[in-house]
Image (cartoon, grey):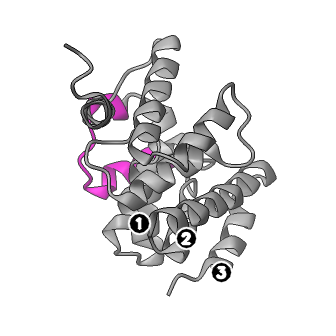
Amino acid sequence: MYNADEKKKFLKNRLSQKRYTHSLNVAEECRKLAVKYGEDPDKAYYAGLLHDICKEIPAEEQKQLILESGFSVCREELETHSLWHAIAGAYFIKKEFGIEDIDIINAIRFHTAGRAGMTRLEEIVYLGDLISADRDYKDVDKMRKLSYSDLNKAMFEAFAFSIKSVVKKDGLLPVCTVEGYNFYARLCCAGKQK
């Protein structure tokens, strides 16, 4: 059902070697997380493989795909170029590959911004991208360990990490990101804020 080999050839021609390697690493991480959390490993691998499919196309093409998509996109997302590839990629796989699985589409759509109430596959791709083998930021090992021990806590920490990073760069926070942070804060920290 998920023809990963065919898509690998497509990605190899479309992405830089570094981005292609990253996509393979994310796919592998997603497969492992899926096994851990009882999701379809092949589907998770496939979504992870395709998550950055539009990362290296020109910004104008990304924006055009977003505008064609019909997806609900907030102002902050439209004003933040680094988020465009996720929205464009979700629409691209639907338009060009005929992928109709909303879980795969949303896993790609929200792998950067996140949102409240993410499905397990969305969480897996979000974390798989953050902890893949090629990542080497400070505390990545802590994040990897957490991702395999407490999924909700890992998501909370991932949102906190992402928000701190955006704030440090004076960036804009999409509404869905703030809602996602609050969602996982309630799951993990309810009762701690008295």
Answer above or below: position of 46 versus 175: below
Query: Residue 126, which numbered label?
Result: none
- Within 10 Å of disc 1 (Cα), the crowding (few <14, some 14-19, many 20+) is many
Give residue 3's quadrant in the image. Answer: bottom right
Q: Is residue 72 left or right of residue 100?
A: left
Residue 88 in sight from this viewpoint: no
**Can you tell which of label 2 and label 3 is closer to the viewer?**
2
Specify few, some or many for label 3: CA neighbours under 10 Å numbering under 14, 14-19, or 20 or more. Answer: few
- What's under tag 2, amino acid-wise? Tyr
Disc 2 or 3, which lies upstream in sequence?
Answer: 3
Residue type at tag 1? Ile
C-beta proximity under 8 Å, tags 2 and 1: yes
Magenta stretch in the rendered image: 61-78
As measured in the structure, the alpha-carbon distance from the residue carrying label 2 to the one carrying label 3 is 11 Å
For image coordinates 46% across by 12% down, the residue present is 170
Does dot 2 land on a helix, a strand or a loop? helix
- Name the front one of labels 3 and 1: 1
In the image, is residue 54 part of the stretch drawn in magenta?
Answer: no
- Quarter where residue 115 is shown: top left
Residue 187 lies, in percent from the top left, at 27, 38
What is the x, y in percent for residue 67?
32, 49
Asked if residue 77 lies in the magenta stretch, the reply is yes
